[in-house]
Image: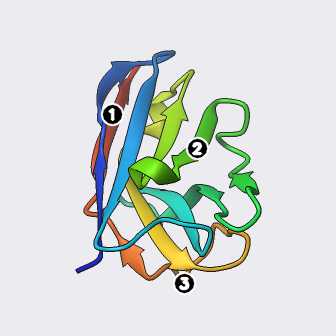
Amino acid sequence: EAQLVESGGGQVQAGGSLRLSCAASGFTLNELWAVGWFRQAPGKEREGVSCTSGSDGRVAYADSVKGRFTISRDNAKNTVYLQMNSLKPEDTAVYYCAATLATGCYLGVGYDYWGQGTQVTVSS
C-alpha cells in the first residue's frame, strides 16, 4: 500500500527553522513522481507551498515562502524534505506532503497520495 508519512513538525519561535520530512513507502519516489508540500491553517483553504519534479529537477514555491523555504528530495532514501527558515507566525498550519505521477510539478489539485500531516506552530 502506497503511503506518505510526514515528520519534523513542532513549535518554534518566529525566525526559527524546522525541517519537514516526507517518507514514502509502498512505492518508489523516482523520476516519475512529482511531490508537493501543502499547508492548511485553521479556517483557511489548503494552499500549495512547494513542489519538486522527479523528471527534470524543477522546483516551485508559493510567493509567500520564496527565499525562506527549500524543497529537496533524496530518491535513495525515498524521502522529500522541506527546509523552512525565517519562520513567521503566518506559517502556522498543518503541513502535508503529496505525490502524483507527473512531468514537472505544480502546486494545485490532482495529487494522488497524501500524508496525514504534521503540525507547525510559530509563535511571535
Q: CA distance from mark 1 to mark 2?
A: 22 Å
Q: Which mark is residue 110?
A: 3
* Pointer 1 local density, CA inside 10 Å: few below 14, some 14–19, many at least 20: many
Q: Nearer the viewer, residue 38 or 89?
A: 38
Describe residue 48's horizontal placement relative to residue 43 as left or right. right
Describe residue 42's horizontal placement relative to residue 67 as left or right. left
**Amino acid type indicated by mark 2:** Ser
Residue assigned mark 1: 121
Tags 1 and 2 touching, CB below 8 Å: no
List x then y, in percent, for residue 29.
Answer: 48, 65
First in sequence: mark 3 vs mark 1: 3
Dot 1: element? strand
Dot 3: element? loop
Residue at figure coordinates x 68%, y 68% from the top left:
105
- Position of the N terminus by quadrant: bottom left
Residue assigned mark 2: 72
**Amino acid type indicated by mark 3:** Gly
Question: Relative to 74, is 38 above or below?
Answer: below
Question: Relative to 70, is 39 above or below?
Answer: below
